[in-house]
Amino acid sequence: MCVITGVYHRKTNTRSQKIPPFLYTQILLLLLNTLSSPSFTHTHSNSLLKRSIQSMENSIQFDLIVVGAGVMGSSTAYYAAKHGLKTLLLEQFDFLHHRGSSHGESRTIRATYLQPHYYPLVLQSYKLWLEAQAQVGYNVYFKAPHLDMAHFNDPTILAVIENCRKHGAQHHLLNHMQVAQKFSGNFNIPEDWVGLSTEHGGVIKPSKAVAMFQTLAYKNGAVLKDNAEVTDIKNDGGVVVLTASGEKFHGKKCVVTVGAWVNKLVKKINGVELPILPVECHVTYWRITEGHEGKFAIGNDFPTFASFGSVYVYGTPTLEYPGLIKVAVHGGNPCDPDKRPWGPLVMMNELKEWVEGRFSGLVDSSEPVVKQSCMYSMTPDEDFVIDFLGGEFGKNVVLGGGFSGHGFKMAPVIGKILTQLVVDGETNEVDLKHFRIGRFNLTSKI
């Protein structure tokens, strides 16, 4: 089975690549055969050995090939290797590149969703983030409260409130004066707005988190390769994964998690064009007025936050850049991920007005001082795609994509779900009806 995720990797310095246990015997036999060969000479022994090892790697059958080494693919590789699967993780660019959806300095984690099926996934992810960082020995999750805000009659905030009640989630509904009091005057919402405060917030360090999952996958015996662009996947009873450089990797199953490139690859594989739209978005950081920096720092009860309405604004406490606060718009412009425009920011005037109005002059709203770009993979309903690719592949290829700008926080549980689909053909973590490809009523064009 193959899992496709958003990033591909191949180590060019083979000495830094850990040799998994199942390769030891084969490499030893290869060395003996090479050294005893009549054609062996000192001058060409290295190239002969390298070609032989490359050929051997290509002929090995893996239990699982994961395509795309962003956070979803790297998480899947970790849980699969931990489960005992002979796992290969492929990435089309360098590991930890900045061209997809899994890089940067911070992501919000929150449990306040209007869709009820995400609440248990987020709660499980909190637990799994803590377990994974305990395994690797450093922190990627930083605790903070969370605040949602909107007009009192906004349908999104009403659905979030109802969802909290449905799940018995502890929350506090606040008027504008109570919001100001709870957060020391740092937030100023209009009189006809409400705030919803919970303890289920926090910040994830994304690049650090991807590196964590890759490290743990490696420690559990997975093989990692970057600069290995997958161009096609063939059915031979299992899967054959083909790369742009001519390599062939054989596996029993495959998981595809290639982020913004998912449409291009899936269309090549089976002719299906998924309604997953690549979108270029931006995150922005704003300067805090001198003398007030500590009020916005993580650990001082300043929350991660989301503001619903005509513009969806979100942000995090000060963590990565001292003296700056992250405030950004959820959304962007459609683009080809291979022809990024690196274009202008969307709804910048509305965002400036929001910063000025909500922070009472404590944050300079004239212009963001740091701007960073990343990719979303948007579905029409903003629900994920987690399903078997089907067709001639049956259950041998699993697809994870369309995470729509809000999936990163759930990467551990999604990696676990994709692994369960590979191993068991089903998952007990969530009802997959919300994430099935079939909800789009697609047909193959091949």
Image: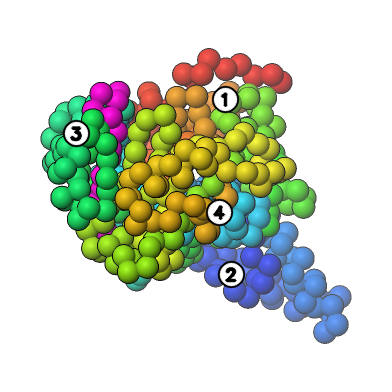
At mark 2, the secondary structure is loop
Residue 61, position as x, y percentages in the image? 59, 50
Report, in whole angstroms, how far the alpha carbon at label 3 lies from the one at label 2.
46 Å
Q: Is residue 147 magenta?
A: yes
The residue to which callout 2 is attached is 17
Q: What amino acid is labelled 4 in the image?
A: Gln
Residue 276, position as x, y percentages in the image? 56, 30
Q: What amino acid is labelled 3 in the image?
A: Cys
Report, in whole angstroms, how far the alpha carbon at label 2 lies from the one at label 4.
31 Å
Residue 31, position as x, y percentages in the image? 69, 75
Answer with left or right where residue 20 lies relative to residue 151: right
Q: Residue at x 31, y 65 (%)?
A: 292
Report, in whole angstroms, how far the alpha carbon at label 1 lies from the one at label 3.
30 Å
Q: Which numbered disc, 4 or 1, marks the residue that appears first in the sequence?
A: 1
Q: Which numbered disc, 3 or 4, marks the residue that appears first in the sequence?
A: 3
Q: Residue at x 13, y 35 (%)?
A: 168
Answer with left or right where residue 159 lies relative to residue 240: left
Q: Residue at x 34, y 38 (%)?
A: 307
Q: What amino acid is labelled 2 in the image?
A: Gln
Residue 58, position as x, y percentages in the image? 68, 54
Report, in whole angstroms, how far the alpha carbon at label 4 lies from the one at label 1.
26 Å
Residue stretch in magenta: 140-155
Q: Nearer the viewer, mark 3 or mark 2?
A: 3
The residue to which callout 4 is attached is 372
At mark 3, the secondary structure is helix
The residue to which callout 3 is attached is 164
Callout 1: 10 Å neighbours few (<14), some, many (20+)?
some
